[in-house]
Amino acid sequence: MAQLLVRNLEDSIKGRLQARAKRHGRSTEEEVREILRNAVREEAPRPPLGTRIARRFASIGLDEEILELRGQPPRSVDFEP
């Protein structure tokens, strides 16, 4: 297995890591390994926003198609006629 050496870590960070490890009932070294594992874990891709909105409101009768606006810059809304 690989080893990783972290230099110049602030004492306050080390103390917080030790306290966190103690709360979780493991060594500081194991706590850091778990933090690193979680940091690089691949997340499942999320469905596009329009799909998520449609799913959320499907139970109240939303049957309108919500277009996916990919690659378009954000625009401000103009509420004036």
Image (cartoon, helix red, strand yellow):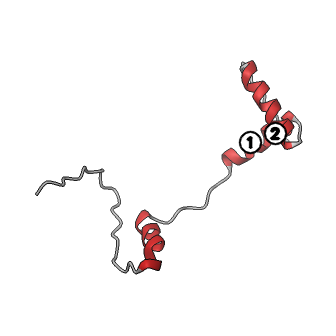
Tell me whether the residue at label 2 lies in contact with that at label 1, contact meaning CB atoms closer than 8 angstroms: yes
Q: Amino acid at mark 1?
A: Ile
Q: Secondary structure at mark 1?
A: helix
Q: Position of residue 18 (x, y in %)?
A: 82, 30
Which label was assigned to residue 13? Answer: none
Most extreme residue toward the left is 81
Apparent side of residue 23 relative to residue 50 in the rendered image (left or right): right
Apparent side of residue 40 relative to residue 81 in the rendered image (left or right): right
Residue drawn 73% across the image and 21% down it = 12
Apparent side of residue 60 relative to residue 1 in the rendered image (left or right): left
Residue 2 shows in the view: no
Q: How many residues crowd mark 1 within 10 Å: few (<14), some (14–19), many (20+)?
A: few
Report which residue position mark 2 lands on: 31
Q: Amino acid at mark 2?
A: Glu
- Quadrant showing the N terminus: top right
Q: Secondary structure at mark 2?
A: helix
Residue 49 shows in the view: yes
Residue drawn 38% across the image and 78% down it = 62
Report which residue position mark 1 lands on: 35
